[in-house]
Amino acid sequence: MLAIFALVAGTAFKVIPLLNPNSENIKENIVYDKKTGTVNVLIVGTDKVPGEKRNRSDTIAIASLDIDKKVIKVLTIPRDTRAQIPGKGWQKINHAYAYGGIELLGKSIVNLLAIPIHYYVVVNYDSFPKLVDLIGGVDIYVSKHLKYHDRAGNLHIDIPKGMQHLDGKTALGYVRFRNDAYGDIGRIERQKKFYNAVFEKLKQPEILTKIPSLIKEGLRLIDTNISMSQALQLASYLKDIPRENVAIATLPGRPAYIEKVSYWIPDLAAAAEFLASTPTKPKIIENDGNTKEETAKAENTIQLKWPLVILNGDGKPRLAQRFAYLMQSKGLAEISYSGNAKHFDYKYTTVRIPKDFADEDINLVVTFFTTIGLKEEMIFKNSDVKTITLILGHDYERILKKLES
């Protein structure tokens, strides 16, 4: 939502005769990190849960604006990220807002990333659909059918696979959906695609006529300590920023269970490298939401092209779900189901292939699983399965280490 507001405000300067500031003007009127020349903005999307008195942070991101280089980097932070919350100890980062609002969340982010937070933007999802409708919705390629119903939370999502035009209500469902093995990581990837779709929409000439209502709605929507003059000045300064100077990434890390609680364990060195780097190549978005660089990388990365079922044959709680989350977050396979096997006495991890698979397809399956650490003799046809099935045995740790590396 900060991106929408900034881009719209920036576009407004093409029709509103205001003075375009330079970098020195910007530095005179805003707080920034003098060592790096960056302005760091904490972006929070809040969600009110029925029956709860306080809002919770449903989406967290850091926007880092390099004033001199005109570079914008956005680091999205999974809500399950393990972080030290002042006065509360090690917990999931999204708990901080419920405990102490934007102030405590800001302190927790400073502890986590070791960067200063200069400004914040808090968005209430209740107003999100109205702003999307003001720009006439967006066009997005939906990579798979998104379906989820929560009557208690009054959340109903049903978006078919394929190219879709999303109005405000549907777009909200699109950016909130996380009811699959990808979880929060998958939702963040969809939010990136939504941002890029909005970016393209706001460049269309017909949007110019809607700028006054967009600005009015944006100001009503956003709770921030950025003043109107500061926001417009920044937007004006960055209005012509090239696409290759905008980079969006998810906080690097891995899933893990600590004391029976699932966390996202951040790779802080990789996060610092991203925030300190400068984008050098254009990131042209394909119709599947990936960049051309990502698509080329994927073509050279081993990937299972059939759906995979993962079963826990060891007995460790939520072991299958952990593997599913890890494999999907790395883009290795699409998980159609994860759960428990019929018993927990599997000594070795095995893969069972449906009997109707052709020999050339079996070779691809064998290549995939031996690459991630399985023994070839543990991969075989089985008439009892209709989908490729991975049954985790007592030797799962060896395979887990291979996947994590």
Image (spheres, helix red, strand yellow):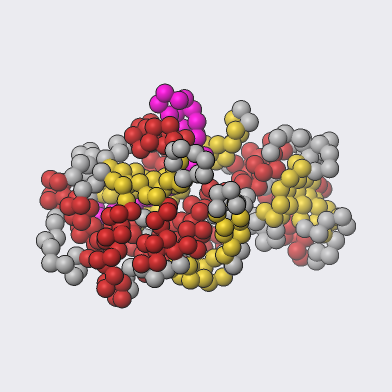
Tell whether position 78 is magenta: yes
Q: In which quarter of the image is the C terminus?
A: top right
Seen in the picture, residue 315 relative to 151 is either above or below; the reply is above
Residue at left offset 27%, top offset 60% = 216
Instruction: Provide residue 186's location: percent of width, then percent of height.
Output: 54, 53
Kindly give the residue lying farthest to the right in the view shown. Answer: 383
Q: In which quarter of the image is the N terminus?
A: bottom left
Tell whether position 159 is magenta: no
- Quarter of the rendering containing residue 6: bottom left
Q: In this view, does 4 lie to the left or right of 47?
A: left
Q: In this orientation, which residue lies closer to the viewer: 121 or 368?
A: 121
Instruction: Provide residue 53's location: percent of width, then percent of height.
Output: 46, 37
Residue 251 visible: no
Q: In this orientation, which residue lies closer to the viewer: 154 or 16?
A: 154
Seen in the picture, residue 61 relative to 14 is either above or below; the reply is above
How many circles with numbers are drawn on the protein? 0
Residue at left offset 49%, top offset 27% = 90
Instruction: Provide residue 34's location: percent of width, then percent of height.
Output: 20, 39
Residue at left offset 61%, top offset 27% = 259
Instruction: Provide residue 149's location: percent of width, then percent of height.
Output: 61, 55
- Quarter of the rendering containing residue 254: top right
Residue at left offset 11%, top offset 61% = 19
Q: Is residue 304 left or right of residue 96?
A: right
Kindly give the residue lying farthest to the bottom in the view shown. Answer: 206
Q: In this view, does 153 lie to the left or right of 16?
A: right
Residue 310 visible: yes
In magenta, the rendered stretch is: 68-93
